[in-house]
């Protein structure tokens, strides 16, 4: 039996971390403050060149649920995949090393997912946007209710960021892990794959602001817009033809506006 099963972990929290020394402590502390404490927490140091690992070690010395895993730099997708392999709780949540959760994030998401029915594979909450210094500047609009693959394409990834979701581990068992060949939109491709190929293809949006996302910090993957557009083109080519409920052309509207 795995460590997480013996310890009663309900959620595997995974943070891919690369050169996030100024913010990783805040991210970890937001996990430690969760009102739902039945989690294991894996921080994957993806070859950082700053003090990221030192900050994690200091927090891990205070909380046995935290585990630091160091690996050569291979990108956030590979770091998330390593976290999935090294953990085993029935639910999985990802928190980027520069974001933070509100204390009710896990409890609220679990309540919704556990009562959502057999076809819902993941939930996502609403997001507030903060500046690099941590100051919240406003909410980010997101839909609530059930979202299928068509809606994820037509509304340009309603979950918006990987830190907002709680996912059944069975989804990864069925469709595989993150695509490390993508330079951007790695999480969006995974949600589309779950929607297209999982036996639990639906997502449910929660109408609560439970995560703060640090917007466009220096060196972040999301700041590379060229890579983002290249990845979106690949996703649209693969998944837009699979749309059944909505017209395929709707998948191209928002990417065209942003471009």
Image (cartoon, rainbow, N blue to C red):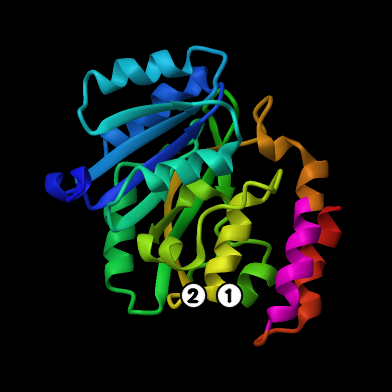
* Rendered position, 94 above or below 150: above
User: Residue 211 versus residue 13: which sits nearer the camera?
Assistant: 13
Q: Nearer the viewer, residue 205 or 174?
A: 174
- Residue 252 located left or right of residue 82: right
User: In the rendering, which numbered label is found on residue 65?
Assistant: none
From the viewer's perspective, tell me whether residue 7 is left or right of residue 160.
Answer: left
Residue 256: percent from the left, percent from the top? 85, 61
User: Mark 1 or mark 2, which is nearer the start of the sequence?
Assistant: 1
Q: Residue at x 60, y 33 (%)?
A: 74
Does dot 1 land on a helix, a strand or a loop? helix
Q: Is residue 36 among the parts visible in the rendering?
A: no
Which of the 4 quarters of the picture holds residue 244? bottom right
Q: How many marks?
A: 2
Q: Is residue 155 magenta?
A: no
Label 1 sits on residue = 196
Which residue in the structure is indicated by mark 2? Answer: 201
Which residue is most to the front?
1
Determine the secondary structure under disc 2: loop
Q: For label 2, count other residues whose C-alpha is less than 10 Å away and answer few (under 14), some (14-19) or many (20+).
A: many
Please report contact status of discs 2 and 1: CB closer than 8 Å, yes or no. yes
Name which residue lies at 81% across and 51% down: 230
Residue 217 x/y as whole percent = 65, 28
Observer able to see residue 241: yes
What residue do we see at 56% from left, 21% from top? 19
Q: Is residue 250 above or below residue 35?
A: below
Q: Is residue 200 left or right of residue 155?
A: left
State whether residue 7 is above or below residue 72: below
Q: Which residues are magenta?
A: 231-243
Give the class, few, some or many, for how many residues have Cα within 10 Å of label 1's Cα (few <14, many ≥20).
some
């Amino acid at each position: 039996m795995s460590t997480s099963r013996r310890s009663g972990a309900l959620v595997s929290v995974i943070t891919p971390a690369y050169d996030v020394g100024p913010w990783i402590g805040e991210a970890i502390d937001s996990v430690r403050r969760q009102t739902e404490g039945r989690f294991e927490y894996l921080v994957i140091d993806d070859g950082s060149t700053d003090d990221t690992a030192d900050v994690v070690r200091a927090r891990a010395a205070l909380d046995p649920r935290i585990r630091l895993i160091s690996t050569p730099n291979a990108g956030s997708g590979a770091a998330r995949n390593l976290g999935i392999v090294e953990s085993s709780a029935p639910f999985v949540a990802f928190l980027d090393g520069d974001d933070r959760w509100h204390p009710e994030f896990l409890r609220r998401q679990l309540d919704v997912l556990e009562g959502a029915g057999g076809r819902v594979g993941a939930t996502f909450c609403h997001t507030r946007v903060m500046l690099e210094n941590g100051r919240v500047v406003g909410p980010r609009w997101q839909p609530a209710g059930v979202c299928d693959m068509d809606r994820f394409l037509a509304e340009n990834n309603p979950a918006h960021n990987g830190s907002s979701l709680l996912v059944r581990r069975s989804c990864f068992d069925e469709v595989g892990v993150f695509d490390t060949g993508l330079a951007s939109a790695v999480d969006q491709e995974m949600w589309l794959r779950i929607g297209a190929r999982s036996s639990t293809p639906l997502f449910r949006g929660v109408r609560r602001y439970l995560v703060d996302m640090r917007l466009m910090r220096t060196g972040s993957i999301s700041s590379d817009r060229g890579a983002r557009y290249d990845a979106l083109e690949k996703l649209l080519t693969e998944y837009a033809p699979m749309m059944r409920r909505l017209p395929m052309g709707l998948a191209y509207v928002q990417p065209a506006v942003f471009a």
